[in-house]
Amino acid sequence: MLQKKIIPISQVYVPVKRAKTLEPAKVEELAESILENGQTTPIRLRAGNDRFVLIEGLHRLEALKALGEETVEGYVVHARLH
């Protein structure tokens, strides 16, 4: 079972391919929701070399950054082995 962890935003790496999918309007909408309700859905990350790599939750991460937050709730998942 996955456990939520509090991760410093500064330790989260966003792959370029994923960053290209960013929609500013969605970030603004999520930021407003987070102000009202807090972060309700954790992001998903995998452990990398002394950082975490974002798998899912780009808009939530960017909304938290826009609000000046320093940490994010997330699930750290293991990379799939093929």
Image (cartoon, rainbow, N blue to C red):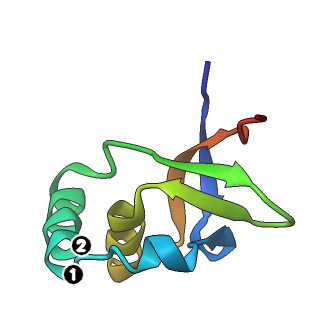
Residue at left 60%, top 51%?
45
The label number, if any, that marks residue 27 in the structure image: 2
Q: Is residue 69 visible?
A: no
Left/right placement of residue 14 relative to residue 26 reads right
- SS category of the residue bearing label 1: helix
- The x, y position of residue 40, in whole percent, is 31, 43
Residue lying at the far front of the rendered structure: 82
Kind of residue at badge 1: Pro
Q: Residues within 10 Å of mark 1 (few under 14, many from 20)?
A: few
Kind of residue at badge 2: Val
Label 1, label 2: how far apart the Cα atoms are: 5 Å
Q: Are marks 1 and 2 in contact (CB under 8 Å)?
A: yes
Residue lying at the far top of the rendered structure: 1
- The x, y position of residue 21, in whole percent, is 34, 73
User: Which residue is nearer to you in this view: 80 or 2?
Assistant: 80
Please tell me whether residue 17 is drawn above or below residue 76 in the rendered image: below
Quadrant of residue 55 within the rendered picture: bottom right
Residue at left 35%, top 42%?
41
Where, quadrant-wise, is the C terminus in this rendering? top right
